[in-house]
Image (tube, helix red, strand yellow):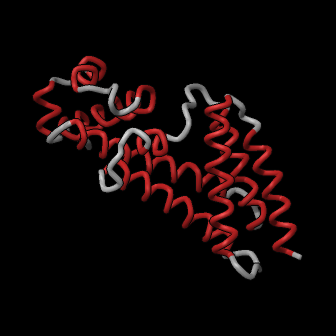
């Protein structure tokens, strides 16, 4: 059973994540968080030292949820090749969803200049998890350099995400998927 404290913390994090994804970190002030969440400022400060702590915690939550979703959906393929291609099918479904605003981690990392800032560290960790997953699946193929393939997959995923958001073109996932098919043919021959 969840306590009132954990429910309040979840409400703060859910609201912060939505606001940050929609508006960015700098445009998401404590006043907006209080107004939107309905949680008193004093309660927010009971859970978090400052806005940066709220943002970092919200991004960590998003990372866990997004990676779980992405892996679960991508893993529905029967073979490693299917799972790799599914990554781009899954991305396209995300691109076509209501409220798609690109990658929260790319967006927020772009707002922060300091590479040691917690937000940048979380973005780096998220991208590392995505690379690790690509490597896990690429490692199931009989290829000479699965790490090279995994890095290529990451670049194609990131390019598709950015193109879909900036250009408003969900077919970026299809274009990336077509390139992946060529890569898979090349590494399999």
Image position of 189 (left or right of 124): right
Q: Does residue 116 appear left or right of residue 88 in this picture?
A: left
Considering every residue shown, the one lying at the far bottom of the view is 144
Q: Position of residue 2 (x, y in %)?
A: 25, 41
Question: In terms of image quadrants, where is residue 81?
Answer: bottom right
Give the quadrant of residue 3.
top left
**Residue 138 image offset from top left, x and y in percent:** 68, 70
* Location of the C terminus (image quadrant): bottom right
Q: Is residue 145 above or below residue 32?
A: below
4 w.r.t. 34: above or below: below
Residue at x 26%, y 26% (from the top left corner): 29
**x and y percentages locating residue 38 in the rendered image:** 24, 20
Residue at horizontal 61 percent and vertical 70 percent from the top = 135
Q: Quadrant of residue 82?
A: bottom right
Q: Residue at x 67, y 72 (%)?
A: 148
Q: Is residue 116 above or below residue 50?
A: below
Q: In the rendered image of this protein, does residue 171 appear above or below residue 78?
A: above
Q: Position of residue 154 (x, y in %)?
A: 62, 58
* Nearer to the camera, 20 or 87: 20
Q: Is residue 111 left or right of residue 46?
A: right
Query: Is residue 43 toward the left or the right of residue 62 in the image?
Result: left
Name the outermost residue toward the front.
Answer: 113
Locate the N terminus and report the quarter of the image it occupies: top left
């Amino acid at each position: 059973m969840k306590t009132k404290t954990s429910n309040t913390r979840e409400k703060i994090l859910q609201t912060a994540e939505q606001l940050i994804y929609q508006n960015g970190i700098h445009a998401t002030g404590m006043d907006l968080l209080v107004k939107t969440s309905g949680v008193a400022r004093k309660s927010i400060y009971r859970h978090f030292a400052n806005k940066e702590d709220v943002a970092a915690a919200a991004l960590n939550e998003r990372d866990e949820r997004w990676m779980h979703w992405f892996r679960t959906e991508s893993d529905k393929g029967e073979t490693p090749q299917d799972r790799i291609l599914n990554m781009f099918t899954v991305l396209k479904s995300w691109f076509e969803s209501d409220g798609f605003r690109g990658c929260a981690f790319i967006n927020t990392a772009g707002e922060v200049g300091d590479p040691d800032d917690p937000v940048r560290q979380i973005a780096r960790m998220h991208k590392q998890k995505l690379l690790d997953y690509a490597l896990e699946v690429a490692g199931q193929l009989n290829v000479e350099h699965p790490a090279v393939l995994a890095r290529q997959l990451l670049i194609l995923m990131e390019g598709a995400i950015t193109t879909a958001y900036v250009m408003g073109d969900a077919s970026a996932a299809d274009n990336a998927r077509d390139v992946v098919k060529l890569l898979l043919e090349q590494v399999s021959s």
